[in-house]
Image (cartoon, helix red, strand yellow):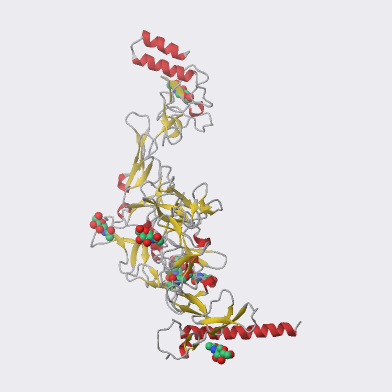
């Protein structure tokens, strides 16, 4: 309805003012205030809904709530106040307006009127009093009020405040440290802040600490105010009187060095030593993140440069990060994930201050925050930097994945038998994948179709599922390390396992696959394997005795026997006692490789095992 009315008026009138008033009236008519309208609010004179706040003595004048002609809006009392010279009520009730500003209701020739009280005097227009504020902190928004510049006060915002370089102490402004002063002056505003130990230096004409040798201007703990503090070693007094300058610099304690000392001096707490300039106590040993610490008074020895604090649990205290901070790999505390931040602030560990002013990971779609590690981490399948793996300056893949090449890029990737979780924050063990077999085509990064490294020792080499390169052979199921291939006794990887089916074992001293103790290796082409030594218990079939020997048993039906030299051969001498040599040959011809050291160690081992077995067997019989 209103819209049509305005439209009609725009057609009729070309004066903007008229249109504006109608818009205003429409707006006011259709809005319903819950209480009276405030000073300078728009109003309609006769409207009983949009009325001006009568508790504040406001009236609707020219569509605006205002004070009538005998009053002015008092910003301090937040209501209309009666002008100077106008009638007032000596003992006003709630419903009676007060005098404006600093004017006072006084009887003048029998009539109570608002009057200025000396030193205040009426302004030229006679409406209010001219008032000079001498006290810091007083309101200065009313008409006629000014802050006393001689007392170093100026109106800032709504209050009289001390000028820069001047300190408000109990309402007075005192010259602070390094402010120019007049030496010997007794006028308060030229006085230095003596309550906090400052004196006017005749030399410099500036406020300085009274004892430059023994005092320094510093902030009192973290309280935001400054004072002259006693340096370490200076006489002090920590009683809580007005003379704060007798207090020690932060971290130092005011103590008598001995029982009979005449007065206390500033000393460092145990484990702390004075800095060279005596301005503070520094820990003898600065503690780093995680180290045990102790709290003495307000002090601790944790590295403050790294924002460390000494935080205590039930049993002991550690140097740690305070609330909202988290440690970097270098043990530096900084604002952590989702803690408030300022745009543009530096943040570590790949955190960024986002628009909503909370720290988030640099890239919220490719990264997530690992609360346990207190770090931003890449999601699985995201691009990673292979040069930065393990380096705290680089963002890392989740622990269950590795940074590896996938075609032409490096990505955080699951290892075989592991699959990415739905939210891509980790890889989970899974039996979903397909195990390939020897000779199958493969991609080494494909965790879905993979060569079973851990089960069969099959690896994806040259896009084919096969044994690892260098000295392995496939026996139909597994790939085994051959004689002489590198191995590792302390590793459980199949790659490091020698082929026990071929009587190989890993030599702990040489880290290669060798024959077990009752076997000897024969390198002749076509034989290259471990064979039973002479006298070893052997199987009749297959006969695996050393060259020129055979598996012999007196009983022709036996399945096992012992290796004996064939006719025309005899056991070798010394090192070669386990093999057969031609009857009339001297024992210096080429011989199969064996290791005396290895064999004697193994012989001892076998000897001990045999004794143990015999002991176990006999005790079993005894206790039967
Ligand atoms: C102004 O308002 C006050 C209080 O509401 C009243 O006493 C006074 O007479 C009014 N003055 C004029 C000029 O209307
Ligand atoms: C004192 O103020 C002067 C002038 O502003 C300045 O050059 C000087 O460095 C200040 N001295 C100290 C100790 O702050
Ligand atoms: C420290 O100051 C208080 C109060 O001014 C005084 O009573 C006390 O004797 C002073 N102590 C010393 C050791 O000077
Ligand atoms: C800290 O102190 C506790 C209790 O005395 C002790 O068990 C712990 O090993 C200490 N830690 C370090 C880092 O010294
Ligand atoms: C893989 O391919 C390279 C180059 O064709 C070749 O030199 C190497 O012997 C191959 N390795 C295996 C295990 O087949
Ligand atoms: C053997 O394996 C262990 C455990 O996996 C490893 O720490 C060690 O470095 C390996 N030794 C050699 C010589 O490869
Ligand atoms: C093999 O057994 C025979 C007969 O018991 C013995 O004389 C010989 O020393 C043994 N040889 C070896 C190498 O143990």
Q: Is residue 239 above or below residue 513?
A: above
Tell me if residue 413 can be seen.
Answer: yes
Q: Position of residue 101 (x, y in %)?
A: 41, 35
Quadrant of res 13? top left
In the rendered image, the residue lying farthest to the front is 567
- Residue at 53% x, 27% y is 35
Residue situated in front as seen by the camera: 552 or 323? 552
> x, y (%) of residue 589?
40, 86
Farthest residue, direction right: 624
- Residue ID at (56%, 74%): 542
Q: Position of residue 577 (x, y in %)?
A: 49, 88
Q: Is residue 447 above or below residue 62?
A: below
Residue 251 vs residue 10, the one in the foreground: 10
Residue at 38%, 32% in the rendered image? 128
Q: Position of residue 199 (x, y in %)?
A: 31, 61
Q: Quadrant of the C terminus?
A: bottom right
Seen from the viewer's position, the closer of residues 371 and 45 is 371
Decide if residue 432 is on the left or right side of residue 214: right
- The quadrant where ligand 2 appears is bottom left
């Amino acid at each position: 309805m209103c819209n049509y009315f305005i439209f009609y008026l725009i057609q009729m009138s070309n004066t903007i003012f008229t249109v504006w008033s109608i818009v205003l009236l429409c707006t006011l008519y259709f809005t319903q205030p819950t209480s009276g309208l405030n000073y300078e609010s728009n109003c309609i004179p006769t409207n009983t809904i949009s009325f001006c706040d009568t508790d504040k003595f406001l009236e609707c004048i020219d569509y605006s709530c205002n004070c009538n002609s005998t009053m002015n809006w008092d910003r301090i009392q937040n209501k209309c106040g009666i002008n100077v010279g106008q009638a007032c009520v000596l003992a006003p009730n709630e419903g009676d307006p007060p005098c404006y500003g600093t004017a006072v209701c006084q009887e003048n020739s029998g009539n109570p009127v608002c009057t200025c009280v000396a030193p205040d005097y009426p302004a030229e227009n006679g409406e209010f009093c001219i008032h000079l504020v001498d006290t810091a902190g007083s309101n200065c928004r009313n008409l006629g009020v000014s802050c006393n510049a001689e007392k170093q006060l100026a109106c800032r915002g709504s209050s009289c405040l001390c000028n820069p370089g001047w300190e408000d102490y109990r309402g007075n402004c005192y010259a602070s440290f390094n402010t120019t002063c007049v030496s010997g002056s007794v006028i308060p505003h030229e006085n230095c802040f003596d309550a906090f130990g400052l004196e006017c230096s005749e030399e410099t004409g500036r406020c300085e600490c009274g004892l430059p040798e023994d005092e320094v201007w510093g902030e009192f703990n973290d309280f935001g105010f400054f004072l002259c503090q006693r340096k370490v070693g200076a006489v002090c007094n920590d009683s809580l009187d007005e003379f704060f300058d007798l207090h020690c610099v932060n971290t130092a304690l005011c103590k008598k060095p001995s029982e009979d000392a005449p007065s206390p001096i500033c000393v460092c707490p145990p484990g702390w030593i004075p800095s060279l300039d005596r301005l503070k106590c520094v820990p003898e040993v600065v503690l780093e993140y995680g180290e045990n610490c102790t709290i003495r008074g307000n002090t601790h020895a944790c590295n403050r440069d790294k924002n460390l604090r000494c935080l205590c649990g039930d049993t002991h205290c550690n140097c740690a990060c305070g609330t909202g901070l988290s440690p970097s790999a270098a043990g530096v505390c900084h604002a952590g994930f989702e803690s408030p931040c300022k745009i543009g602030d530096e943040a570590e560990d790949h955190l960024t201050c986002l628009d909503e002013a909370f720290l988030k990971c640099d890239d919220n779609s490719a990264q997530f925050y690992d609360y346990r590690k207190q770090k931003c981490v890449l999601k699985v399948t995201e691009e990673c930097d292979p040069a930065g793996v393990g380096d705290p300056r680089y963002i890392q893949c989740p622990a269950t994945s590795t940074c590896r090449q996938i075609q032409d890029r490096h990505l955080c990737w699951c290892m075989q038998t592991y699959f990415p979780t739905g939210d891509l924050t980790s890889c989970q063990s899974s039996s979903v994948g397909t195990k390939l077999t020897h000779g199958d085509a493969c991609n080494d990064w494909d965790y879905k179709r993979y060569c079973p490294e851990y089960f069969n020792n099959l690896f994806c080499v040259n896009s084919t599922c096969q044994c690892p390169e260098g000295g392995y052979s496939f026996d139909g199921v597994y790939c085994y390390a051959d004689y002489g291939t590198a191995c590792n006794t302390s590793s459980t990887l199949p790659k490091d396992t020698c082929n026990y089916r071929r009587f190989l074992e890993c030599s702990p001293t040489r880290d290669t696959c060798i024959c077990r103790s009752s076997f000897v290796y024969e390198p002749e082409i076509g034989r290259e394997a471990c064979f039973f030594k002479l006298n070893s218990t052997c199987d009749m079939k297959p006969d695996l005795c050393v060259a020129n020997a055979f598996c012999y048993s007196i009983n022709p039906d036996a399945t096992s026997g012992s290796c004996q030299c064939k006719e025309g051969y005899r056991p070798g001498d010394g090192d070669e006692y386990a093999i057969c040599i031609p009857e009339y040959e001297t024992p210096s011809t080429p011989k199969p490789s064996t290791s005396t050291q290895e064999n004697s160690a193994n012989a001892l081992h076998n000897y001990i095992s045999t004794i143990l077995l015999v002991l176990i067997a006999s005790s079993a019989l005894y206790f039967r």
